[in-house]
Image (cartoon, helix red, strand yellow):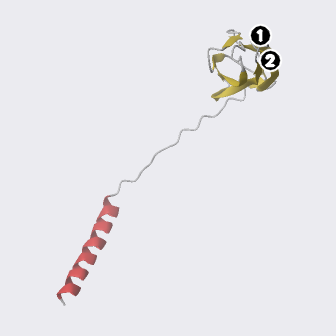
């Protein structure tokens, strides 16, 4: 009988503590902020995002050119463009790209080391919070001795 009384008492306390916790629970009224994109905002459109050089000769740098066009109604600005390593040289216009206009992003790979490669350039613009990742790839053939 004592066991039954103890079990009943424990069950009553558990039930009471759950009800007490629910009564004192704070109601969350978190609001998620949603950014509405302007219909006049710039729109970044790349002609391609991957360039495959195929086979390259070791020690002979090769350049890839990506074309970025502003298909929006406001000027497009390249905030940052970063190459994944020092073996690539990157050039791009720092001026805003007007609506309907294009600019070139040139990536030169030095081809110093033999073997396959895959290098990236991360481009951030005012058109989108997510950056665009451009890729160059190929295989550097060793010099013949």
Q: CA distance from mark 1 to mark 2?
A: 7 Å
Dot 2: element: strand
User: Which quadrant holds the N terminus?
Assistant: bottom left
Q: Residues within 10 Å of mark 2 (few under 14, many from 20)?
A: some
The reply to whether residue 41 is visible in this rendering is no
- The answer to which of 53 and 100 lies nearer the viewer is 53
Q: Position of residue 3 (x, y in %)?
A: 20, 85
Residue in the picture at 75% in, 14% down = 58
**Is residue 100 depicted above or below 33 in this figure?**
above
Residue in the picture at 71% in, 9% down = 93
> Are circles 1 and 2 on residues that touch, CB within 8 Å?
yes
The label shown at residue 2 is none
Residue in the picture at 36% in, 53% down = 26
Q: Residues within 10 Å of mark 1 (few under 14, many from 20)?
A: few
- The answer to which of 45 and 88 lies nearer the viewer is 88
| Residue named by callout 2 | 56
The label shown at residue 60 is 1
Image quadrant in which you'd find residue 143: top right
Dot 1: element: loop
């Amino acid at each position: 009988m004592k066991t039954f009384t103890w079990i009943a008492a424990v069950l009553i306390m558990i039930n009471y503590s759950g009800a007490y916790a629910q009564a004192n629970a704070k109601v969350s009224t978190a609001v998620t902020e949603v950014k509405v994109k302007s219909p006049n905002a710039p729109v970044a459109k790349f002609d391609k995002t991957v360039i495959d050089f195929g086979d390259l000769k070791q020690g002979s740098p090769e350049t890839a050119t990506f074309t970025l066009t502003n298909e929006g109604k406001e000027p497009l600005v390249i905030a940052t463009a970063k190459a994944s390593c020092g073996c690539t040289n990157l050039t791009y216009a720092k001026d805003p790209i007007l609506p309907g206009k294009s600019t070139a992003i040139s990536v030169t790979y030095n081809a110093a080391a033999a073997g396959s490669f895959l290098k990236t350039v991360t481009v951030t613009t005012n058109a989108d919070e997510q950056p665009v990742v451009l890729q160059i790839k190929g295989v550097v053939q060793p010099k013949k001795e």
